[in-house]
Amino acid sequence: MSKTIHIKTNADVLRWAREAMAINKARAIELLEITSHRLEQLESGEKQPTVDELKIMSKVYKRTIATLLLNKPPKEKPLPKDCRTIDSSKLDTFHEKTILAVRKARALTQTLLELRSEMNVPTPEFKLKASLTDKPEEVASYFRKFLNIDEIHSIENGNLFLDGCIEKLEEQGVAVFQLSLTQDGLRGFSLVDESVPVVVVKRGGETPASKVFTLFHEFGHILLNEGGLCDINFNAREIDLEKWCNAFAAELLVPASLFLKQDLVLQYEQQGVKEWRLKDLVELANRFHVGPLVTLRRLLTFNKTTPQFYNAKHEQWNKPSFGRSKTPEGRNIAKETIKEKGRRYISLVFKAYDTNRIDLKDMADYLGVKLSYIPKTRQLLNT
């Protein structure tokens, strides 16, 4: 009869790995398929795990076996502040996919910095800041000029406008990634505890207009030095931080000086009409590369619609399907790779390879794709 092999581990590391994934003991027992007594033995150090138990823990806790064998729990940065406008009972409770997305953003940031160092590309020092005591409209007006948004405002294609906005922030030293955020109602998040500020925008299913608003909402968080996990909503439960970032993004993208001069706004005002047709809201929204709900919120801000009309539409439109892409594409690995990591990151990887700084395997690792997808990724990058 073969002897069961037990592996020496630090109980604190096993407990840390579970808690870092926000898995409580009851859920761990279910996922690991062990008894509560056995879990207590492992996490107290009374008993050591078997090889098979360690493999299952690695899978469930999303950690390598090498990590589970560390002598002590590694220091890991906490999740950003929970800024979702949800019931308080759900605050600070996240799905494992959200936790993994934050980890991925941190890993991509470090990889980006390594690439820049390898290629002797300087990283701009981010010195921009604002305060909650500042009026968000005034800050937005300044940064619209500072970032020269008017330079790209005439771009009609929503995706190209989004790319232009991302480039504007990257020029200031912000790392921008588009990641899959499928849980917890998240539209984006921001990190302020890395070497460079980080903005993450939800990649799949979102319209370019939704992504643009999220991008500048999270940029607001960066300016305030207050990272956060956000659902980007407009309702009465908004905390002050979210209200500020929403107002900042709204004024930056839909400045009052231009918005109130629009022919549709003047037409409705002259007619004394405050209940807007959807097609007119959409037309007005498209002029500023935002969604109709953002436009309606601006109309409410300037008393061009009623609270009753706004609230009714907010309830109707604030659904998972509204404001999402109407024609979701099938998987396109090359396109996903460029969206996820950004054109600057991808260009840096190819430049490192072309100058013999990295080999083909390194390039695949940096891109996070199989070797067979590299030619298509390069081709798409250059189009």
Image (tube, rainbow, N blue to C red):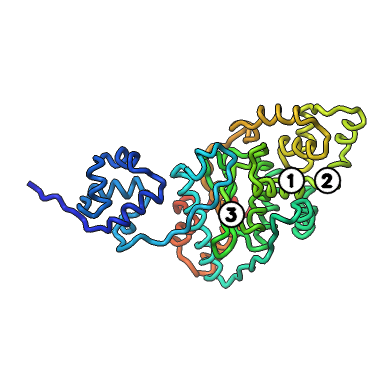
- Mark earlier in primary sequence (2, 3): 3
| Residue highlighted by disc 2 | 256
Q: Residue at x 58, y 35 (%)?
A: 328
Q: 357 left or right of 10?
A: right
Q: Residue at x 41, y 46 (%)?
A: 22
Q: What's the CA distance linking mark 2 and mark 3?
A: 27 Å
Q: What's the CA distance linking mark 2 and mark 1?
A: 9 Å
Q: Amino acid at mark 2?
A: Ala
How dense is the environment of label 2, judged by Cα within 10 Å: few (below 14), some, or many (20 and up)?
A: some
Q: What's the CA distance linking mark 3 and mark 1?
A: 19 Å
| Residue highlighted by disc 3 | 227
Q: Amino acid at mark 1?
A: Ala
- Mark earlier in primary sequence (3, 1): 3
| Residue highlighted by disc 1 | 250
**Circles 2 and 3: CB atoms closer than 8 Å:** no
Front: mark 3 or 1: 3
